[in-house]
Amino acid sequence: MAYPLNMLIISYIFDNMNLAITMNRNKIYFFISFIFLGNSFLSFSQSKIILDKQSAGGYCNQYFNLGDQGFALLFNKFKDRDEGQGSNAAVQNNLYYYSKDLTKRANFKVNTSGILTVYATKNNLFLVDRLNTKYQVKVMDFTGREVANKKFDLESIGLNQDLVSEIHFTAQGIMIFEVYDGHDQLHVFTINILNGQEDKLSEVDIMLPSANPLEKMNFVGQWSLVGESMGYFILARKGANAEYNPNAIAYHIAFYDEDFQLFRELLLDNFLMPNVQMLGKGASFSLNPALQSFVVSCLIQKNGKTGFMVANYGMNSNSSVMNLFWHKEFEIINNDKYKLVQNDGLSVPAPPVIYHKGAQVITNVSRAGTNVQEESINQMTIFDSQGTTVFNEVQMGNYEALNLDNYCVDNDNLYSRIKKLQMNAVLKPYCEMQNCDVLGFDLDANGNELAIVRNYEISKNQVIIYRFTKK
């Protein structure tokens, strides 16, 4: 609608040339250029991409959220099927990759026989096709060119899939399997996907720290892999001196280089404030790679009221004890109604879930437990890099999931965070459609919005991708 309006304005100028000729010629050109620049801004402030059965080669059966690296959509000719059936079955898939700002795009075909999962680092995409314990991993660059291809079997080193807790990829192409045995002890197995000479996983001989800053604590948890930051792998374990003070919680953090040689140890000391009691049996602990800091959160009881705390710690070059950057405490909003935390003496409340968007820290206190992908009622709290509270309300879902049906009726205003966004006007018309859902939506730390809608009406079978730049 903006383009015809601009043409009318330009026509008006030339139709009234007798008046316009008295104006400075540069001003006329500037006025016309300004109109076109404004039109270009309006055009590019919203981007829209449509993928349908004809253009994408079938039905959309998978959406992969790749975090800061973007997302991928999997299409094939089968409806509601994304893996092969039978020992020799194979499915030909079309995979569409997009960066979050939609500037990087790639489309390529991949044949799979098992369950396909897509991972990404800043350098590459990793396509993992798993059939039982057999893996095939393809490495692609962001143009869709295949860089490497490797096959291996977990069974060849005595592992089964049930033991695998998490899979990680490093920017250097190393695939890491995080494994916990029957005693809950951590084992790490790696394989370099970019190295053509490596054909099987090897276990890393992790030199655990000899120092023990938690030695005065009688109850000490096992080591777990927290993540990778600044080129270092980070392990942590929790200690709690329950005999003397049930609220004395601390973390022993160890940094390892790319060869898993011990580099540095740190202590995150007791993060509970005086006169505060921790609810439940655990706290959440997370690494924010953008801030290179550590976030902890747990449910608390203070002055007879149920709440939760969030604290952010950073490294101190002059000490092995971490510095507290900021500490926040919140009451649970209307817990009698939403029952986010139940003190019934039977169930153990789960600690808040922590995740990150760039420098932002986001926590969810949810009655659905720790699965942040579920569409559930939760108290969502968002902090910026300085610890300022950006958002703190009870909501449905989170920034990775949206139930369109609930959004359309939303009698309790539990989608208030979306109603303030540009995408709200775009999503509303889909409320009139029967076969429609939202694969994912995102609000990045800079305020840019992304919504991915699937219309699975047989005649249309579309995936529509919307992106709005911050106003």
Image (cartoon, rainbow, N blue to C red):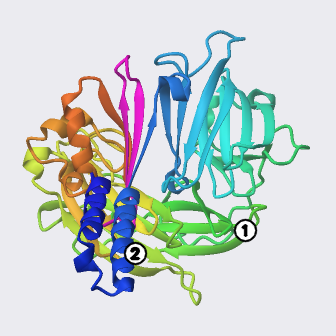
Disc 2 marks a residue whose amino acid type is: Ser
Q: Which mark is residue 36?
A: none
Give left or right: position of 379 versus 26.
Answer: left
User: Would you name the residue on which mark 1 appears?
Assistant: 262
Label 1: element kind: strand
Q: Secondary structure at mark 2?
A: loop
Mark 2 or mark 1, which is nearer the start of the sequence? 1
The spot of residue 228 in percent (x, y) is: 62, 61
Residue at 48 percent of width and 57 percent of height:
101
Name the residue that disc number 2 marks.
Answer: 385
Q: Which residue: 42% across, 33% down? A: 463
- Tell me which segment is drawn in magenta: 443-471
Please, what is the three-letter code of the amino acid marked with disc 1?
Leu
Alpha carbons under labels 1 and 2: distance apart: 29 Å
Relative to 190, say whether 248 is above or below: below
Q: Residue furthest bottom?
A: 318
Left or right side of 311 for 207: right
Report the front residue among 242 and 284: 284
Q: Residue furthest right?
A: 197
Say if 379 sits above or below 445 in the image: above
